[in-house]
Image (cartoon, coloured by chain):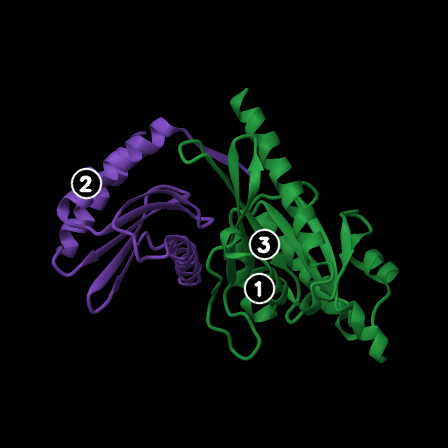
Chain colours: A green, B purple
Amino acid sequence: MALIDLKKKEIYCKIVYYGPGRSGKTTNLLYIYNSLPEKFRGKLLTIETKGERTLFFDLLPLSLGKIKDLDIRLQLYTVPGQSLYKYARKIVLKGVDGIVFVADSLRIRREKNKESLEDLKEHLLEWNIDIHEIPLVFQYNKRDLGEIGIPILTIEELQEDLNRELKAPYFEAVAPKGIGVFETLKTISKMSIRYIVQKYLKYSD
Amino acid sequence: MGIRVLTPEKVSRLEKLLRNYLLSIGVNLALLIDEAGNILVSSGKNADVDVTSLAALAAANFGATNQIARILGEDDFSILYHKGKKDNIHLSKINDDIILVTVFTDEVPLGLVRLKANQLAKQIQEL
């Protein structure tokens, strides 16, 4: 649930990076954290990880610009991707305002992407959110792996598997190098803030 | 998906309640947060506490404990209490979506915190 604090003149927006295990959700946050000057970012919170896995969530608070006279505060969260952490994902999705689905381009991860999207739809429904209504952006990550001979899915295949019906914006990405990372963030932030403001205008009518 | 709008009047009233009920008995820090991890209002000494992370973790902690409750056949656990060497934290559910986070030292009796938290919850529910 978005929050607008008219005393501090701030608007809070929760964006969750979703997707299968090891698709690069935390890498997106790390790249954003390392690229932004301190005045735009808060402390990066990561809950102890085992190996390269996120166990509960990562959180990166950002303050990016203004809308009308309200400061925009984004809270970027990741979820643990492995199927074992189903309940943890559900908890992190509580009150979400926008979703980035980070899909793995590796061909062997094709089914994992689809399973994760189904899992997302299911959890959103548990919180009474329709995936067609909430701001959503796809990020097809690891596009560079094809160049070194590892079999990857084509964009057409990824679109067909995940985005055929949803028709959400999508970006190709190589998260460790930052390719597509800020494009994804910019688009989901704009969509989410627009969505919140529309709701607010309705509320204040 | 909803939206919560806090007017300056509402924030001032909530801050006043936190001061009157909790800071007055010696609590160091009191926060009202939602289950998404947003801070609605905070009151007290928070100079060295990262309240953004505290709120996110407290909300997640509450959410995780609720899931444990459901596995055990309970609806939820409405109170959580963690005891440290010097600081303690008490989390209590105010209503469907709002959690009260209270941080206090051993000098403040837990029973008093619980009593005041209960009274405060009633006041907030009436708002």
Label 3: few (<14), some (14–19) or many (≥20) C-alpha neighbours in 10 Å: many
Q: Amino acid at mark 2?
A: Tyr
Determine whether label 2 and label 3 are within 8 Å by CB: no
Q: Amino acid at mark 3?
A: Val
User: At numbered mark 1, what does the secondary structure look like: helix, strand or loop?
Assistant: helix
> x%, y% of residue A47?
46, 68
Determine whether label 1 and label 2 are within 8 Å by CB: no
Position of B69 compared to B122: left or right? right
- Give the residue at x 26% y 58%: B89
Question: Which residue in the protein does label 2 denote?
Answer: B21
What's the CA distance linking mark 1 and mark 3? 19 Å
Q: Quadrant of residue A172?
A: bottom right
> x%, y% of residue A69?
52, 31
Question: Which residue in the protein does label 1 denote?
Answer: A34
> x%, y% of residue A116?
67, 62
Label 2: few (<14), some (14–19) or many (≥20) C-alpha neighbours in 10 Å: some
Question: Which residue in the protein does label 3 denote?
Answer: A16
What's the CA distance linking mark 1 and mark 2? 42 Å
- Chain-order first, disc 1 or disc 3: 3
Can the viewer see residue A121 in this picture?
no
User: At numbered mark 3, what does the secondary structure look like: helix, strand or loop?
Assistant: strand
- Labels 1 and 3 positioned on one and the same chain: yes
- Give the residue at x 43% y 57%: B60
The residue nearer to you, when weighing A205 against A109, is A205
> x%, y% of residue B14?
30, 35
The residue nearer to you, when weighing A39 against A5, is A39
